Image (cartoon, helix red, strand yellow):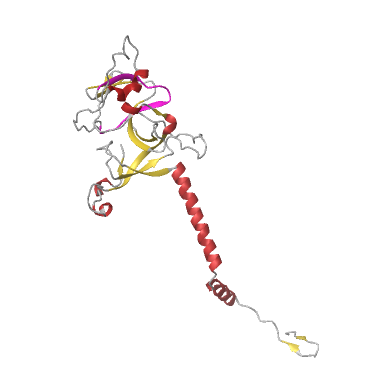
Amino acid sequence: MEVTDTGSAGTPTPPARRVTPEQRTEALRAVNRKWRPLAFLWEWTKIFWISVALFLVIRTFFVEAFKIPTGSMENTLQVGDFLLVNKLAYGAEVPFTHDRLPALERPKFGDVIVFDWPVDPTKNFVKRLVGLPGDTLQMRDGILIRDGRAVRENYVLREDTPPDNSPDDFAWQRDYLVRSAGAAVNYRPSRNNWGPLVVPPKHYFVLGDNRDDSLDSRYWGFVPDSLVTGRPILIYYSYAPDSNQALAWMTHVRWRRLGEFVR
């Protein structure tokens, strides 16, 4: 039997209506369909800042994009190549500190590395590592000699242009020459003839693969290991920028280079 309540005047009060699950679902949908601009804006703001934070974390500690601006590494890397650089490999630097994350590996002879240029650390360079700490390096007629043995370098490009530098461009090398009587006094280095030099601890010697057109360790010295930022992984995009067309990045894509690993 259904019981009804009565008001003060004795008038029966209608029984409360039961809300079915279907009605509750439809009511919630109606509420959600209402335009709530502040809530919408707040949700997109959260998504934006989360995306920015993820991007910064990935760029700082894992992978960073890098563009090749010069031909110093041809033919391994060409002007207009866009690289993905593995920053975790050698231990990414923690922002605003001089601390680094644990390295997964150490730079090896023959690695292509990205580093902050010692002359101006705001600029990034990419070169091939040819000298490790303790190595004795020299060059004779363009042939690299490491610890007394000629290095076979199939990746090297030579343009056979005459050197246009003077011995003063290599003055820094005198402090690292293998000592012998009168070595520094009689030292007359050039682009293709220099050394022997000893690589100091915690430093590397780097050269560009385009040996006749590369600003590298021959001219400005060793790279401290603290300035090495990563190792290129692959070429994710490439185009020929020497075209006169404004949309060369779309019309002169080097399709065969896309996805090519850097070696």
Q: Is 34 situated above or below 91?
A: below
Q: Quadrant of residue 25?
A: bottom right
Q: Quadrant of residue 89?
A: top left
Q: Nearer the viewer, residue 147 or 115?
A: 115
Residue at 35% across, 41% down: 233
Q: Which image quarter holds the C terminus?
A: top left
> Percent x, y for residue 162?
19, 28
> Percent x, y for residue 230?
40, 37
Q: Which image quarter holds the N terminus?
A: bottom right
Residue at 31% across, 26% down: 218
Q: Nearer the viewer, residue 40 or 14?
A: 40
Q: How many marks?
A: 0
Q: Is 258 situated above or below 134?
A: below
Furthest-top residue in this view: 181
Residue 205 counted in the magenta span: yes
Q: Is 36 situated above or below 239?
A: below
Residue at 55% across, 71% down: 32
> Percent x, y for residue 179?
35, 13
> Percent x, y for residue 9?
80, 90
Residue at 40% across, 44% down: 64
Residue 172 counted in the magenta span: no
The span shown in magenta is 193-210
Furthest-right residue in this view: 8
